[in-house]
Amino acid sequence: MYEFISHSENDTIEFASKFASKLNSHSTIVLSGDLGSGKTKFTEGILKYFGLENEISSPTFTIVNEYDANNQKIYHFDLYRLSDIDEFYAIGGEEYLQNGICIFEWGEMIEEILPATYIKITFSRDLEDVDLRRLRIEEINK
């Protein structure tokens, strides 16, 4: 486990951009945390590493956004609006796994079908400093 303290949105973006350099074409990342805790900004940082920082949009209503960076597929999911794992299956979500980098906001819902190894990042806000975020990074091995 590793913990990163972010003092601003830009800190989060820069950290995520460096983090992205360690990803491979089958990396799966689950982003957990309250609304507004920095999950989408973290994804923006990953996209920045791949030269796609101007492409980001929240997939809240579309469930998944697909990006292509030099033959590297990146799938950004926001599962907040799904009621259960069956809805994920209904959109063909499992077909994205192993076909590119998968980033899941609110991915706890589908943990049972995630690969044997994935990265879970838990975001928490500080009650006194509105800009401070704690990111707990864990490699999960089922």
Image: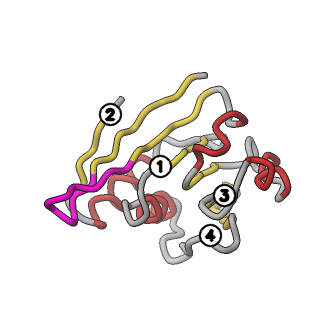
Foreground disc of the pair 4, 2: 4
Task: Give, as a three-letter code, the residue at label 2.
Answer: Tyr
Q: Earlier in the sequence, mark 4 or mark 2?
A: 2
Q: Residue at x 44, y 43 (%)?
A: 121
Residue at image mark 1: 32
How far apart in space, not on screen, are marks 2 and 3 (Cα)?
A: 24 Å
In the rendering, at what x and y percent does residue 48 appear?
46, 64
Q: Is 112 left, or right, of 141 in this rendering?
A: right
Q: Earlier in the sequence, mark 1 or mark 4?
A: 1
Choose between 140 and 21: the one closer to the eye.
140
Foreground disc of the pair 2, 1: 1
Q: Residue furthest left?
A: 128
Residue range in magenta is: 123-133
Q: Is residue 54 within the magenta segment? A: no
Residue at image mark 3: 75
- The local crowd at label 2, few if under 14, some if 14 to 19, many if 20 or more residues have their Cα within 10 Å, is few
Residue at image mark 4: 59
Task: Give, as a three-letter code, the residue at label 3.
Answer: Tyr
Q: Secondary structure at mark 4?
A: loop
How far apart in space, not on screen, are marks 2 and 1 (Cα)?
A: 15 Å
